[in-house]
Every structure is written in C-alpha cells, then in structure tokens.
Amino acid sequence: MAKTYQYCVAENWGKGFIDHGESTKITFASFPGDVWQVPAYNKHGNLWIAKVAGAVKTKDEAQTIVTAKVDAAQTAWDNNNVEGESSDEKDIRLGPKPEDITLQE
Amino acid sequence: MSEYKTIHGVKIRDYTTDPDNLLTGQVWFDKTNKVLQFQAAGAGAFSTGGNMNTARRRMPGVGTQTAALVISGTADPPVYAQVESYNGSAFSEVADVNTSREEHAAGGTQASAIVFGDKPNNANTELWNGSGWTEVNNLNNARYELTGDGDSSTAVIAFGGAPQKAVTETWNGTSWTEVGDLNAGRGNLHGAGTVTSALASGGYTTAYVAVNESYNGSTWTEVADLNTARGYATQTAGSNNTSALVVGGAPDTANTEVWNGTSWTELNNTPAVRVNAAGAGSTASALIAGGRNPNLTVTSLEWNDPVLSTKTVDID
C-alpha cells in the first residue's frame, strides 16, 4: 500500500519555519519529539523538509520517537502530585494525562 | 487572442521588479521574467511565529499579531511573573507583573494593558503603561478561569470564571462596575470585544460546552453555538461581537473556527492540538503563543486570512 505521509525530525526555530505559502500548499501535523508529518510523494513537502534540514524518518522510526516523548510526559504527569488532591482536582490543575499517539502510514 | 485592454478597459503596467503595496486582484507584466502576474487572495492559514523565551500556559495575550504582550502563566508549577513582548518576529522579556498569575485575563494593547483575576480566586488588578506594572483597584468579584478584552486599558470587560460564574464587570480606567450577567455561568470560556460589544464562547460548566453569547453593552444574548464544544481555547477578535477566531482548546483539539456575527465556520487546523495558549490580534491577523501542543511549548503560530500570494499566469 502506498504511504500517505512522510515523517521528519526538525526543530521549530520560530518565524519562517513554516511560512504561509507552505501552509497553504501542505497539510502539516506535528508531534512530540519535533516529529513532523507532511504528505508523501509531494513536491512541496519535499522542498519544505529540505528547507528545514529535516532528518527523514520511516513511520516506525518516527513512532519510536513520539512514543518515547509521550511515555516521558505520562510519567511526569503521574509523578506531579499535590498532597490531598483528588483525581478530578489533578485533572483540572494539569489537564488530562497525555494520551498515546499512533502515527499513520 | 483578446487584448487585456479590450476586456478591462485599461492597459497592464509593466515592472522590472514586483510593485510595492500590492492589491488583491492587481495584474502586472514582469518585464524581467517576461510573465504576466497577479496578486491572489487564498484561504486563511497558519505559519510559525517567533518562539517565546519561557514555555507556559493558562495566560492571556493582548495587542496585535505584530505588537503583542503575553502575560504571566504557569508551567504546572512554577507560576511565572514573566511578561514577554512580541514584535512580529521575536519575543523579548519586559517588566514582570507584581503578582504571578495563572488562569487570569487581560485587555488593552502592547503599550497600555490591564491584567486581572488569578487562581485561586484573586481579585487583584494591575495596569501596564508600556514599561512597568502598577496595582490598581481590584475586581468586585474575585475569580479565575475568567476572560475579558478591550481596545484600551481604560475600557475593558471581564466576564465568567470558575466555578460557573456569570458575573460581568467593566473597567473605566479607575474602577470595576458590575453589569449584566452571562446567561450561562462558566469558566475556561473565550472572550473578545469591548465594553459595548463582546462575545463569550465555549467554556466549562460540568462539561465542555459550545454555548456562545453576544453582549450589546448591557445584556448578554445567546447566539449560534460553536461547532465544537470546548474550553481553554484561544479567542481573538476585532473590536466588536461580529467577528472572532477560536483556535484549539480542550478536549485537546487543533480545530479552528471563525465567527461572522451569525454563525461559526470551520477553518484550517493548527499543525497540532493547541490548548491554553495566549492570543492577540484579529480574525484576519492573529498570534497564538505558548500553551500545550500537547506538551508545554514555547512555539507560536501566526494566522492570516486571506493569505496573499503572487501568481504567474500561464499564457501559452
């Protein structure tokens, strides 16, 4: 099955990392670990990855990076407690526990 | 082939470089590359803005996309007193607020702002004069998870708050006065507008809600709901209750909606979920800074609608 997306790792440096022209041509998705998803077999996606010097990853490699970051965030959430706080109060204070993320092919 | 002048009654100007101050629909001939070009207006889209110095969330922003302040906020903990100023490309730290805050609200501009409320149930109000913060008269109703807005630090509206507060107050430059309550008391709601024309969307009662209310200077009226129920989103607007932009929010979403005075329309999503971020600007030109995406982030997004671009016409 032909893949729909391609993945890379690139740190968002701020202004100019994604410009409006790129945003109108490509649907971007970002994930923990500086993992970015752009359409596969797409000229504009390839040009953007080159512009940001993105390290291209397979879906499985990208998934490993994202999962490690999510696991760390879940552990940090589990360990962030205030004495006497109920689970509802913790949800309000911190927001929900970070959920697992599954990348698409 | 038809001549352009025959169809439009005018000739096309030619340039060796792109003309300045392009208008949507403007057509010109590029003498250097020998191509016909025009200025097109595309759908709204996000780009990346400058990164903040300190990652945090649950804080408001004021100002415009190119002249904004992001005020205080939390990293669960600590709660920061830091204030950062944005110039359209980079953030820089300015003077701290006197009271570190989270889940507070603000109004005004980059040069003249007011910040009010705080968790848990703080009525404290501070005024920014462009260089420092001064404590002024408190809110009448201490609260957090409230919202507010205003074009200047002498005319600001504050409404809602936790737990399920409906109270609305206006600031006249000296003190707060209670005015008409919201119909649906709620916290984590999104606000925009002025003391005479404001909008309150979404929020949390016992669950996230899509409720939307419009304020006319004295009373709130329920109007069309958001398409997606949410709280903790970022709302920016023009100077009245007929235009607003809501970005992200909880339950975690990347969804963006725009309000035209009558109904909400879904627009392009943010690249990742964005919750508890600060916002500034308008529906045409907005800044979304910090918050969670889903982890705490220093990154910002700039929304522009329409996105202007120069197109080359194929005349072969």
Image (tube, helix red, strand yellow):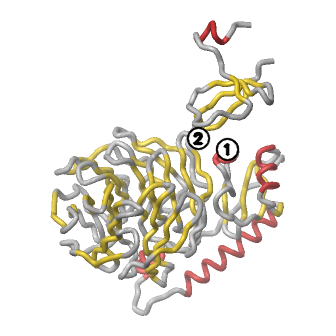
Q: Chain of mark 2?
A: B
The answer for how far apart the CA atoms under marks 2 and 1 are is: 8 Å
Q: Which quarter of the image is occupied by the C terminus of chain B?
A: top right
Q: Secondary structure at mark 2?
A: strand
Residue B142: give x, y in percent of width and height: 24, 75
Camera-nearest residue between B305 and A45: B305
Report which residue position mark 1 lands on. A21
Q: Amino acid at mark 2?
A: Val
User: Relative to B306, is B279 on the left or the right?
Assistant: left
Asked if residue A93 is positioned above or below residue B270 in the image, the reply reads: below
Q: Amino acid at mark 1?
A: Gly
Asked if residue B144 is positioned above or below residue A81 in the image, the reply reads: above
Q: Residues within 10 Å of mark 1 (few under 14, many from 20)?
A: some
- Residue at the extreme front of the image, as rendered: B16
Residue B303: give x, y in percent of width and height: 54, 50
Q: Chain of mark 1?
A: A
User: Relative to B39, is B160 on the left or the right?
Assistant: left
Camera-nearest residue between B61 and B43: B61
Query: Which of the 4 image quadrants contains residue B48?
Result: bottom right
Report which residue position mark 2 lands on. B307
Circles 2, 1 touching at the beta carbon (< 8 Å): yes
Q: Residue at x 60, y 66 (%)?
A: B51
Residue B17: give x, y in percent of width and height: 72, 34
The label number, if any, that marks residue B229 in the structure image: none
**Does the rendering let one see residue A91?**
no
Residue A102: give x, y in percent of width and height: 69, 63
Camera-nearest residue between B161 and B227: B161
Q: Residues within 10 Å of mark 2 (few under 14, many from 20)?
A: some
Q: Which quarter of the image is occupied by the N terminus of chain B?
A: top right
Asked if residue B255 is positioned above or below residue B176 in the image, the reply reads: above
User: Relative to B73, is B145 on the left or the right?
Assistant: left
Q: Residue at x 39, y 68 (%)?
A: B130
